[in-house]
């Protein structure tokens, strides 16, 4: 049984860029942000309407919006159907600018590590924004910053942790290069501004390196994962993400990352939540794939 044999209209509510990268055969693309303005289009569709996304979050939002628009016969295809079969590469860095530190008034004129961190972020974001507006999906994020001891003290160090991802190894290398250039520029400018004391130094440490990986959707493991999801009532959709599957996939070893089950939302935010709604199905899915891979079903 293939996804195209499902008896309903299938709507992919991800972005057009994600849809163009991969989608269920026969699916239409209507990003979740456009649902309200396209209620009439939905009302003209054959029902039931199945909506799906990458992780299940956008599909849940889509179903809620459609219900608000009096479109009742809607199926949320999120959940265990999301199968990560490709690896989005990622580079992660911890960058630490270091100086002598001192009193904010008495030692004024010394290099300030915070100034350099702020400059580096500014220069990086300006170039990264332009770089990521075209080509394969590439992202960047300054996730954590720190340093300093007191409001009246020039910090002796300032650090940040940065994450960059891309489905293309070339694009990942490209945005990494922009990041390194921004750091060097910030260091040079802060040292040029000092009025006394020693130069600022910087330590750039890579703390994460996940290689990009692509594998054929026709691999037995991928096909069995899709078949298992369908048997358990889900609509399988293949996607790329940055997971522990990256390394084996990059080395030619078949691997997938499968859905966690249950219902959740707000990933990595203060409002993140998860409810164990039929979470046991994810365990069944895992065991079924394992049994199929082991050949015990024969």
Image (spheres, rainbow, N blue to C red):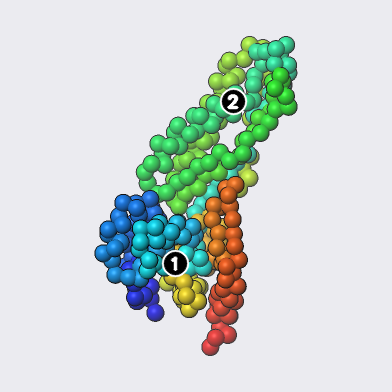
Quarter-of-image position of residue 130: top left
In front here: 70 or 159? 70
Q: Which mark is residue 116?
A: 2
Which residue is pictured at 68% across the width and 31% down the height? Answer: 147
Q: Is residue 44 left or right of residue 254?
A: left
Circle 2 Cα neighbour tier, 10 Å, few/some/many (<14 / 14–19 / ≥20) = many
Image quarter of residue 247: bottom right
**At numbered mark 2, what does the secondary structure look like: helix, strand or loop?**
helix
Q: Residue placed at 50% from the left, 76% from the top? A: 232
Image mark for residue 178: none
Mark 2 or mark 1: name the one nearer the start of the chain.
1
Q: Residues within 10 Å of mark 1 (few under 14, many from 20)?
A: many
Q: Residue at x 44, y 67 (%)?
A: 77
Name the quadrant containing residue 294.
Answer: bottom right
Judge by depth and name the residue closer to the eye, 48 or 233: 48
Disc 2 to disc 1, C-alpha distance:
47 Å
Which of the two residues, 217 or 79, is positioned nearer the viewer here? 79
Q: Which residue is mark 1?
A: 77
> Residue 57 in the image: x percent, y percent?
49, 57
Position of 280 with respect to 6 (left or right) is right
Q: What x and y, as percent, mark residue 66?
A: 38, 59
């Amino acid at each position: 049984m293939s996804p195209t044999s499902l008896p309903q209209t299938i709507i992919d509510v991800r972005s057009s860029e994600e849809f163009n990268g991969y989608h269920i055969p026969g699916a239409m693309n209507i990003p979740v942000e456009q649902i309200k303005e396209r209620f009439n289009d939905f009302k003209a569709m054959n029902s039931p309407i199945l909506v799906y996304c990458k992780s299940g979050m956008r599909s849940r939002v889509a179903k809620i919006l459609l219900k608000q628009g009096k479109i009742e016969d809607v199926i949320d295809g999120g959940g265990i159907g999301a199968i990560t079969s490709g690896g989005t590469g990622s580079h992660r860095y911890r960058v630490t600018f270091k100086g002598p530190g001192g009193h904010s008034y008495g030692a004024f004129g010394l290099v300030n590590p915070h100034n350099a961190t702020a400059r580096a972020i500014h220069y990086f974001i300006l170039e990264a924004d332009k770089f990521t507006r075209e080509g394969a999906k590439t992202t960047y994020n300054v996730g954590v910053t720190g340093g300093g001891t007191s409001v009246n003290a020039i910090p002796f160090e300032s650090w940040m942790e940065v994450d960059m991802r891309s489905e293309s190894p070339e694009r990942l290398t490209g945005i990494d290069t922009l990041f390194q250039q921004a750091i060097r520029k910030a260091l040079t400018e802060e040292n040029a501004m000092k009025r006394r004391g020693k130069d600022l130094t910087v330590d750039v440490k890579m703390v994460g390196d996940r290689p990009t990986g692509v594998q054929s959707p026709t691999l037995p493991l991928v096909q069995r994962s899709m078949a298992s999801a369908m048997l358990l009532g889900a609509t399988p959709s293949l996607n790329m993400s940055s997971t522990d599957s990256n390394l084996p996939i990059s080395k030619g070893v078949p691997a997938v990352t499968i859905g966690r089950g249950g219902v959740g939302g707000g990933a990595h935010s203060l409002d993140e939540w998860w409810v164990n709604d039929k979470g046991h199905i994810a365990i069944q899915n895992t065991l079924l794939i394992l049994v199929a891979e082991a050949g015990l079903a024969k």
